Amino acid sequence: MADPVAQVLDAVTGLTDPLLEELATLIGIPSVTGTDAENEAQAHVASRLADAGLDVDHWPIDLPALTAHPDFPGMEVDRTEAWGLVGRLPGAGEGPTLMLNGHVDVVPVGDPDAWTTPPFSADVRDGRLHGRGSCDMKAGLIASLWAVRALRVAGVGLRGDVVLASVQGEEDGGLGTFATLQRGWRADACVIAEPTGLDIVPANSGALTFRLRIRGRAAHAARRTEGVSAIERFWPVSQALSELERRRHASVDPLVARWPLAHPLSIGRIRAGDWASSVPDLLVAEGRLGVAIGEPTDAARTDLEDAVAAGCEGDPWLREHPVEVEWWGGQFASGRIPPGSDLVDRVRAAHRTAGGHRQDVYGAPYGSDLRLLTGLAGIPTLQYGPGDARLAHGPDESVPLHEVVTAARTLALVALDVCGTD
């Protein structure tokens, strides 16, 4: 009897060249979150799932109904159209189901001049493929698809199903995975191929998007003392937020102790004023509040609101004109694989068999769809995928090609292990 492990690994090896070609093709689709190209990328992946012989569920997401759901995780861009997508490799119906999950959307490229080559050119240099989304996380998505393709090509009979969920809207809240769960798709275990450098991430901190409105009083700049600058009033608020971040890191979960900041608080955008010769009467600051692993999101929100209120108390103007706090956009709770799951051990063993390096296991200081799969559906979920998250969202984003292949080999072996063979 043929060894199914050897069969599947041989199949991945035979598919390596088309794997890398397909990754370059997908990177060439500029699927920035909220653009038409995001839907185009989903349609492209749907065609590849069909080409691989999978059962394909490609459906238009009912955005009004979904966004009205009390558990909707938030969205930071306007969409008039979005699509869910799942491909299923059916087993015999007698074993557990494994879900592989990846997102097609990418963040904007930033300053194009900061890139060595055009952001969507999928340039290959020194064994790395460069381009926006190469690391976060089209490499992981394509590795997942090729793992499923290898299972089919190898002709190994699985007892349980393998489902591949290709999602959009992950970068701004988790729209796609939430829609997949609302569609009724479930699994007994899930691997999200986010960039971990092929380490294992079984937990995430969370991140809550907030907006602050600081009001001043407008005046002609020549009579500055008769106005109140909203920009100057931001200073005591900023100090209060810095102190809040320090206090919230007095003790952290051991899984995220490796990070200088396990759940950072940051201001990402500030806008103020409408005329250079006027005292600005409004400053709007937008940022993200990190959520500690296991911390309820309501408690984290209250912590920030209380800190802002305390900052206002120390300033005579803000005491009378308190800062307004709004929670909007992506609302990422923290997440952790359920106790008692053996998925970490299974992925570690598959990675070793696939020829991978020694792995670390740790929590990540950012939010991801892991918290939706574990928190809303109770699915044991971890992150394992190619690429270094430090390169995500920056210029010259890239992924090592050998990691993409190793990830595909590992994920195929995880499927054999979780789903079982006939």
Image (cartoon, rainbow, N blue to C red):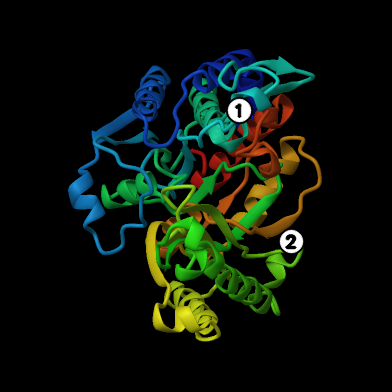
Label 1 amino acid?
A: Val
Question: Which of the pair 48/345 is nearer the observer?
Answer: 48
**Quarter residue 115 falls in:** top right
Return the residue at label 1: 8
Look at 36% across and 19% down and name the residue there: 47
**What residue is disc 2 on?**
259
Q: Is residue 191 above or below residue 133?
A: below
Q: Spatial distance from mark 2 to mark 1, Cα to Cα?
A: 37 Å
Q: Secondary structure at mark 2?
A: loop
Expressed as whole percent of the image width and height from the top left, the position of residue 274 reads 41, 49
Report the residue at 38% width, 48% height from top.
Answer: 76
> Please, is residue 143 above or below residue 358 in the view?
above
Taking the spot 50% from the left edge, 21% from the top edge, the residue there is: 26
Q: Nearer the viewer, residue 102 or 390?
A: 390
Percent position (x, y) of residue 9?
Answer: 65, 27
Tag 2 near tag 1, CB within 8 Å: no
Residue 165 in which image quadrant: top left
Q: Position of residue 280 (x, y in %)?
A: 45, 58
Q: Earlier in the sequence, mark 2 or mark 1?
A: 1
